[in-house]
Amino acid sequence: MDRIRDLASKKAAVIFTKSSCCMCYSIKQLFYELGASPAVHELDKEARGREMELALIGLGCNPTVPAVFIGGVFVGSTTDVISLHVDGSLKQMLINAKAIWF
């Protein structure tokens, strides 16, 4: 869990994904379209990916990917991020975390 928290705090926006996950791809594209350049950690390509996935479960991530952190804070998975985007607060969260500038 420490590794997840450490990685999540190193950049303003961090997404834990799997390379074969279509929802992960969609969330990454949304962040790119909003002007963010998130740190992306593909668990299926990480040496300690399974351990990291178990840590995400311990943090309450279900499903485990995509797991989105903004400003070092766990935001949620696909449904949570899309809801934030629809109500307009995702962009403001990214601005507040200095993941995008306007």
Image (cartoon, helix red, strand yellow):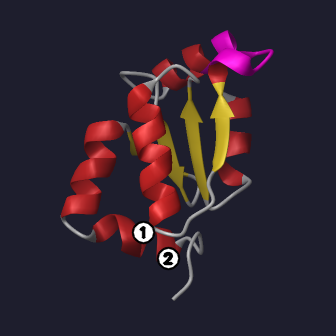
Q: Is residue 59 visible?
A: yes
Asked if residue 51 is positioned above or below residue 73 in the image, the reply reads above
Q: Residue at x 73, y 42 (%)?
A: 6
Residue found at the very far top of the displayed protein: 50
Residue located at (37% from left, 37% from top): 77
Residue 96 - label? 2
Residue 29, image x, y percentages: 47, 50
Q: What's the mark number on residue 19?
A: none
Element at label 2: helix
Instruction: Name which residue lies at 26% across and 40% down.
Output: 79
Magenta-colored span: 44-52
Say which amino acid is labelled 2: Asn
Vertical comparison of 47 with 24: above or below: above
Among the 4 quarters of the image, the one containing residue 3: top right
- Measuring from the top left, give residue 15's x and y in whole percent: 56, 42
Residue name at image x 64 percent, y 22 percent: 43
Q: Are marks 1 and 2 in contact (CB under 8 Å)?
A: yes
The answer to whether residue 32 is magenta is no
Give percent across and percent down for residue 13. Answer: 58, 56
Nearest the camera: 55 or 15? Answer: 15
Left or right: 26 with respect to 18?
left
Q: Residue furthest right?
A: 47
Q: Is residue 75 left or right of residue 56?
A: left
Query: Residue pushed farthest bottom?
Result: 102
Tell me the kind of residue under disc 1: Met
Question: Real-space Cα distance between discs 1 and 2?
Answer: 5 Å
Tag 1 residue = 93
